[in-house]
Image (spheres, grey):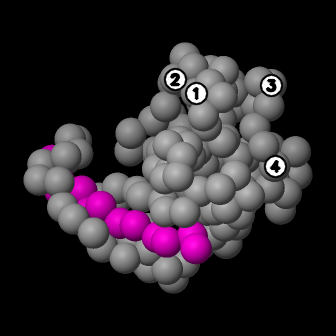
C-alpha cells in the first residue's frame, strides 16, 4: 500500500472507484474542482498501481473538514481508510491545523469506529443530512494539538 497525494492523472480512476464504491460518489468534475484549489489536500491509497482508496480534506485554517473517504469494496477492512485518514491528519498538523471536523452517517458503524479509534469524538447531529437513504449525520471533531 502506498499513500500519496493525488495527481491529475488519478482523477478518472478515482472517479470510477467513487462511482462503484461510494454512497455519495464524487464526479470527475468535482474531483478536478477540488484538485485545482489551494485549500484542499487530496490523497490516494494505491495498491499495485491502482487507486484503492481516496480521501480529501478542506483547510479552513486553523480548522479543517474531512470531505470524503472512500475505499474500494475489495480493500475494505485492510487498513486503507486508517492510513488515508492518518496521512491527511499528519499533513493538516504540518500546515498548522488545530482541529478537524467530519460528518458521518449515523448508521455507518465501521466508519464511526475508525474515526473513534483515531480520536474523533461526537460533537453534534444534523437531522436528515443524507439522502438515499435519508439519515442523520453525526458531526465529529478531533483536536490536533
Of callouts 4 and 1, the N-terminal one: 4
Q: Which mark is residue 9?
A: 3
- Mark 1 element type: helix
Nearest to the observer: residue 29 or residue 22: 29
116 part of magenta stretch: no
Q: Residues within 10 Å of mark 3 (few under 14, many from 20)?
A: few
Left or right: where 105 falls relative to 87: left
Confirm or deny contact between disc 3 and disc 4 (CB under 8 A): no
**Residue 55: % across, % down:** 60, 48
* Mark sitting earlier along the chain (4/2): 4
Question: Can you identify the residue that label 1 sits on?
Answer: 34
Measured Cα–Cα span from mark 3 to mark 4: 13 Å
Q: How many C-alpha atoms fall within 10 Å of the one at disc 2: few (<14), some, or many (≥20)? A: few
The residue that disc 2 covers is 30
N-term-proximal mark, 3 vs 4: 4
Q: Quadrant of the N terminus?
A: bottom right
Asked whether residue 73 is in view, the answer is: yes
> How crowded is the residue under tag 4: few (<14 C-alpha within 10 Å), some, or many (20+)?
some
Q: Secondary structure at mark 2?
A: helix
The one nearer the camera, 90 or 72, is: 90
Front residue of 72/67: it is: 67
Which element is circle 3 on? Answer: helix
Q: Which residues are magenta?
A: 134-145
Where does the C terminus fall, quadrant-wise? bottom right
**Label annotation for residue 4:** 4
User: What is the C-alpha distance between the residues marked 4 and 2?
Assistant: 19 Å
Amino acid at each position: 500500500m502506498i499513500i500519496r497525494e493525488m495527481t491529475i492523472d488519478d482523477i478518472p480512476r478515482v472517479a470510477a472507484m467513487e462511482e462503484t464504491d461510494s454512497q455519495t460518489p464524487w464526479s470527475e468534475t468535482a474531483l478536478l474542482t477540488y484538485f485545482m484549489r489551494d485549500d484542499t489536500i487530496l490523497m490516494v491509497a494505491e495498491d499495485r498501481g491502482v487507486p484503492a482508496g481516496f480521501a480529501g480534506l478542506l483547510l479552513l485554517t486553523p480548522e479543517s473538514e474531512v470531505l470524503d473517504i472512500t475505499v474500494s469494496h475489495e480493500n475494505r477492512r485492510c487498513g486503507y481508510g486508517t492510513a488515508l485518514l492518518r496521512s491527511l491528519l499528519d499533513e493538516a498538523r504540518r500546515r498548522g491545523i488545530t482541529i478537524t471536523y467530519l460528518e458521518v452517517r449515523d448508521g455507518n458503524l465501521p466508519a464511526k469506529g475508525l474515526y473513534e479509534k483515531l480520536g474523533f469524538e461526537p460533537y453534534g447531529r444534523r437531522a436528515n443530512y443524507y439522502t438515499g437513504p435519508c439519515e442523520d449525520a453525526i458531526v465529529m471533531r478531533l483536536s490536533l494539538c
